[in-house]
Amino acid sequence: MEQTSHAFKESAAAALVDEQLQRALGNVRRGFVAKRAKAREALPEFDALKRQAREIKDHTLANLDLYLEEYERKVLESGGHVHWAATAAEACAIVLKICQDVGAKSVTKGKSMIAEEIGLNGALEAAGLEVVETDLGEYIIQIRGEGPSHIIAPAIHLTREQIEADFRRVHADLPADRRISEPAELVAEARVMLRAKFLAADVGVTGANFLIAETGSSVIVTNEGNGDLTQLLPRVHVVVASIEKMTPTLEDASAILRVLARSATGQEMSTYTTFSTGPRREGDPDGPEAYHVVLLDNGRTEMLGSEFHEMLRCIRCGACMNHCPIYNAVGGHAYGWVYPGPMGAVLTPQLTGVHNAGHLPNASTFCGRCETVCPMEIPLTKLMRHWREREFEQGESPWQARAIVRVWAFLAKRPELYHWMMQLGPRVLALLGRKRGHFTSLPFAGGWTKHRDLPAPQGPTFQALWHLEAIRREDAAREAMMGAPQ
Amino acid sequence: MTGDPNREKILSAIRAKLGVRGDEAGRRGLARTRIDRAPAGIIPARAQEDRAALIRRFTAALEAQGATVERLKKRSEAPEVIASLLRGLNMPLQLRMGSDPLLESMPWDTTPIELKFGAAEGSDFTSISWARCAAAETGTLFLASGPDNPSTLNFLPEMHIVMIAAEDIVGPYEEAWGRIRQLHGRGKMPRTVNLVSGPSRTADIEQTIIMGAHGPKKLVVFIASR
């Protein structure tokens, strides 16, 4: 997909005045945030489980080479194939070749952020294959020609009216007078349209939430069952997964599952969690005849051992964006690529370059809600701060920002000058605003005063008051000591 | 595949970045032990209750997700109960199943239900499977693929009926995996293990939960004994 992260400011401004988008975004708060809070409350061990999930992933990453080797051995043992892709282009080429080798015409897809990341649909379509997204949200954005706006709810930026209009446009063979204004009617129509696609597909492509070294299994977590029909019905199942999806054992995956759905949708467990190991066995009446796994690096090894190492713990639950005031205000498309919200602000510059996405880590109030709710305890604000530093070092930030930081740094290193300046500001403002008691406009703060007045400072600064209070308290203490009987 | 230049490239990049070699006996031993022993971590208290409480939790969790759960006195009651269920829902008296002897041996001929065997087809209305085991902590059924219970039965029909033996309802996922390992061997898995915690659903349109997205619209669970 075409990246527009560099235009975050413009996209965000447009998003803020998009009434339909704002109405749709209200669903994030009402849905995800409230449900997660409830699920967490219902499980007293939740915080301990978070810590454990983090430890499992830290251990796995520290031994990633060994677990990958063992995983590969087990996949081969179960009759599957393993392919290694260093880049997005290589991964697409591998999947395309698998499709072409079996003479495939149509490909169904389960929801996969990795497939979005590598632009798999475009690559397969360019070679003449029909690619059908089967997750309802992905299907909706596919027929609209859009990218996902959320990592677990790709169509959350849309209202039912918009989706109805799209279905009427695309499902043109269906009677024009049918009723599809209710979500249930839209779901029923998508079910019928996609059922035919499931049954006709030659290859099914899914992502993976986990890869299990112990058994060579790939795991998908879904609610609709589309991922299962995608991997169960076609002749060939292709799993595309990045290397950090590795998990040592079934126990480790289960431990992480306990925090995944609760953090994502607020469910205790997603409806379907499927462990797939190799192709159809002897005597099996269903299942794919061939099973392929494409292990993708695409920048992950680069992150290992770097200051962004901890981001590799991410399990893509989406809690960080659900709780992010910026995401809630502007939605996912403003971020301009596959991964939005705080996790996207950390990942996108890594995967696409600071030059293209250096803006994103600035789209944060640094309130820290994201890292509070992260089930893998990823220090998202710290990681965003690393990107800000890199952006500054590489001279990517705007000159005004750089100039202000320089001036500030000069003052901060000289405390006396700093305090003097800080006292000067309020005094000047107090003097100027003496008459009216507030300002309706101020130089350099037009953005602020455009929406509200700034009250004029009244009396001394907090620092000055604090200082006075400290002296008063010291005096009182001394008096008390002297008055006390010896 | 071994010999793939990308494989070596990625593995050596990992080792370089981690500052390891890959042949350290200590690290290898640690990873080996973890895989071989598969230690369990924190088990939530809710998964460690007595059997009666676990069955209550299993039932409540599935019902909260929109499934129906009913306890049968004996396995042989199932055909009659299913026949009246289908009639009540005004659904065709047809049922798709695999070759699980626990299901096949039930007295189907006392009912007018027409049985179909093997993998599900897109036109099937109702299927029945026998679950290997279940984890009560979240009302999660563990279904294993094979000719006895083909995986398509879990997804293609409009309604999925699952039978589970009360003695196979355990507390945590870890214990359920223990049962799977007992049956298939350590480090081995059936081709597909489906963990099912309710009927198919989606919330992709305005976060409104709708049942029956692509998989079964109804999930009916019968607890019986084996």
Image: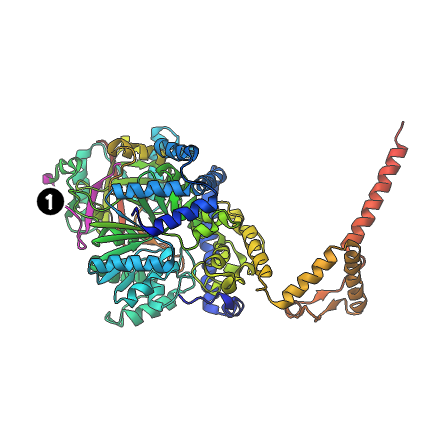
Give the side of residue A179 with respect to residue A402, left or right: left
Please name the residue that numbered disc 1 is placed on: B112
- x 24%, y 71%: residue: A175
Q: Is residue B127 magenta?
A: yes
- Residue A185 in sight: yes
* Label 1 crowd bin: few (<14), some (14–19), many (20+), radius 10 Å: few
Q: Secondary structure at mark 1?
A: loop
User: x%, y% of residue A192?
Assistant: 24, 61
**Residue B136 falls in image quadrant:** top left
Q: Nearer the viewer, residue A305 or A261?
A: A305
Residue A12 in the image, given as x and y percentages of width and height: 52, 67
Q: Estimate the x, y position of residue A194 in percent, counting from the top left.
A: 26, 60
Judge whether residue A295 can be spotted in this image: no
Nearer to me, B79 or A312: A312
Circle 1 chain: B
Q: Is residue B37 above or below residue B198?
A: above
Determine the image quadrant of residue A133.
Answer: bottom left
Residue B170 to residue B194: above or below: above
> Which image quarter is the N terminus of chain A in?
bottom left
Question: Going 31% across and 39% down the picture, which residue do you hit?
Answer: A215
- Which residue sits at x=40%, y=32%? B29
Q: Amino acid at mark 1?
A: Pro
In depth, the one of A128 and A226 nearer the eye is A128
State left or right for residue B36 relative to residue A384: left
Work out whether residue A347 or residue B203 is closer to the camera in this orientation and state it.
A347
Snapshot colouring: rainbow
Chain part drawn in magenta: B109-132
Magenta highlight on residue A167: no
Q: Position of residue B135 (x, y in %)?
A: 33, 36
Placement of the C terminus of chain A among the 4 image quadrants: top right
Q: Is residue A483 left or right of residue A233?
A: right
